[in-house]
Image (cartoon, coloured by chain):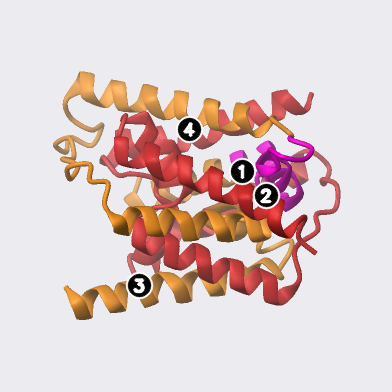
Amino acid sequence: MDWGLALAGGLLIGLAAAGLMLTYGRVAGVSGLVRNALAGKMEAVAFVIGLPLGALLVQVLTGGGAPVSFASAPRLALAGLLVGVGAGLANGCTSGHSVCGIARLSPRSLVATILFIAVGAVMVTLVGVPA
Amino acid sequence: MSRVLVFLLIGVVFGAGLALSGMTDPAKVVGFLDFFGHWDPRLTATMGGAVAMAFVGQWLLRHRGRTLTGAEMPAFPPSRIDPRLLAGATLFGAGWGLAGLCPAPALAVSVQYPVALLFVAGFIAGLLGVARLGAKNG
């Protein structure tokens, strides 16, 4: 059930990463693609527009999901800032490092992923569930 | 098919995967990161599936030596583990745990839940801020 969806979703994410690699030899790193989109590269803009379209498609096909709740506005903005500075310094985020980087056995990406998860876990323990 | 259309299609598949897996629900991500509380291991299947598929893509590319569009295999820069990477990954993890969001899922849910755009705005500010500082120092 839920395990199956988690796996199926992961396979689709990996398929997208493999697709970008096989067609154009590009790493499906979302922070890099966002940067290119902001610089006006149309292909990157198209990718970024595709993300919500894919999520909407799933929502329509599955008859809408359970309501999702988010952290408070200041907490969302601060979290985004931390993630942005972090992805800028680390040159990649969960997609670039944790999917594409690990898939090509990059030690750098493995270290980044371990830190993403370890520090994320510490943060959740320290500050609790977002509200 | 044009390059822009291929990128759009790949974005749609990526976004669908994020929504299907539950990565777009901050509560599920926080549950996955909650090792010291009520750990929800299900997103390990998401990461495992994604890495496995991406690995197959890498393997096929290496096997072919060229991309499907005939381009040379990309050369990746040497894998360097430096203080910049460690600091960046630490800040990233802190933000990820703080809101249960990372960039791709935040963008993916931004139409249904525009509040996620606050995260996206912070992300873009941070990303561009680092790029600007880097350009000044580099």
Q: Distance between the residues labelled 2 and 4?
A: 16 Å
Q: Name the residue under label 3.
A: B130
Q: Does the magenta stretch include residue B69?
A: no
- Chain given the colour orange: B
> Which chain is red in the rendering?
A
Q: Which of A112 and B13 is in front in this view?
A: A112
Q: Where is residue B81 in the image (x, y as percent from the top left)?
A: 27, 46
Label 4 resides on the chain identified as A
Q: Name the residue under label 1.
A: B18
Amino acid type of the residue that numbered disc 1 sits on in the rendered structure: Leu
The chain holding disc 3 is B
Q: Which of marks 3 and 4 is in front?
A: 3
Determine the chain carrying the residue at label 2. Answer: B
Judge the density around disc 2: few (<14), some (14-19), many (≥20) Cα neighbours within 10 Å.
many
Residue B26 shown in magenta: yes
Nearest to N terminus: mark 2 or mark 1: 1
Residue at label 4? A14
Against B82, is B74 above or below?
above
x, y (%) of residue B127?
41, 69
Q: Is residue B51 left or right of residue A123?
A: left
